[in-house]
Amino acid sequence: MTVTSVDAAGLGRRRAVGLVTPALILVTAFLVVPAVWTVYLGMTDYRLTGIQAANPQFVGLDNYRAALVDPDFRNSLWLTLLFVLGSAIIGQTVAGFALAWTLRAVPRLVRGGVEALVLLAWILPSSIVAFLWVAYLSGDGGTLNALLHTSGTDWLLEHPMASIIVFNTWRGTAFSMLLFSAALGAVPPSQLESARLAGAGTFAQLRDVVLPHIRGHVLTNTLLISLWTFNDFSPYLLTAGGPNHASETLPVFIYNKALYGGQLGYGSAISFIMLVINLVIALFYVRLLRERR
């Protein structure tokens, strides 16, 4: 029996290899090589300036050991997990689903207007959105202070983590809303109507009819926005990690150490640790999806 005869697509081994080779080249060039280079740099004392810039030395796992005992690293890891929990898992998921569920029952014109506003927040460049939120949260003539009559409160300095969590939730809810809108459209209306006729309230309908149908969509949405939020650098545009490291998430911590501080070797080690955490998060959600099937 030839290879072609057992090939469902009829391509044969050579043509199949030729088909996937360009993709493999791109993956190798833009993912594998940078990852390997990051691992190598993380085992050196390479810096942007000084003797280590011209003649970096191999230090093995010293950078990783230093990271594990670095209170600033542990603080940034905790803040990143808090940022993901508050902004992605709770904020964007809940807000996106609430919008998608609510907009099902409103007139089409109203629904279109709300969706356009939510999408506008998503497609605007991060620098523009950050400037708008800095103006909104400013302690000197900020819009929020004018609305709440709390003149002089500098939200970015006094409540930095809450500020960037709300900022990222507002900015990223559109993706969850669109995904849940498509998922809710696939829920059989007859089942919802049967639940209503049986006396089920809104909560019971969501628990017994809607969520079992869209569980896969919920997990997929949570996986994607968790990874995006975990690696998001945009909080730097609002607080630069301050004040006094109070909002320094891992991407900002790496920037401050590797580029602003010049410690490329140490920053690369943190980057690899961050990559491993991303893989753990992805594998956790993939396992949940497989259990669902």
Image (cartoon, helix red, strand yellow):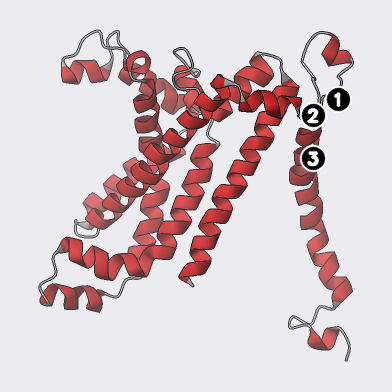
Q: Which residue is mark 3?
A: 36
82 left or right, relative to 71: left
Would you say residue 40 is visible in this rendering? yes
Residue 155 position, x and y percent, is 32, 17
Q: Earlier in the sequence, mark 3 or mark 2?
A: 3
Q: Is residue 17 left or right of residue 248?
A: right
Identify the image quadrant of residue 40. top right
Residue 173 is marked as none
**Looking at the image, residue 209 lies above or below residue 116:** below
The kind of secondary structure element at disc 1 is loop
Circle 3 sits in a helix, a strand or a loop, which is it? helix
Outermost residue, bottom side: 1
Dot 1 corresponds to which residue? 58
Q: Amino acid at mark 3?
A: Val
Q: Is residue 290 left or right of residue 60?
A: left
Instruction: Residue at 80% x, 86% y: name it.
Output: 6
The answer to which quarter of the image holds residue 208 is: bottom left
* Contact, mark 2 vs mark 1 (Cβ under 8 Å): yes
Mark 3 to mark 2 CA distance (whole Å): 11 Å
Label annotation for residue 43: 2
Marks 1 and 3 sit apart, C-alpha to C-alpha, by 15 Å
Residue at point 29% right, 75% down? 188
Q: Amino acid at mark 2?
A: Met
Image quadrant occupied by the N terminus: bottom right
Choose the circle earlier in sequence order: 2 or 1: 2
How far apart in space, not on screen, are marks 2 and 1 (Cα)?
6 Å
Q: Quadrant of residue 57?
A: top right
From the top left corner, tell me how far across and down residue 28 is, in percent: 80, 48
Q: Few, some or many C-alpha atoms within 10 Å of disc 3 (few <14, some 14-19, many ≥20)?
A: few
The answer to whether 109 is drawn above or below residue 121 in the figure is below
Q: Position of residue 43 (x, y in %)?
A: 79, 29
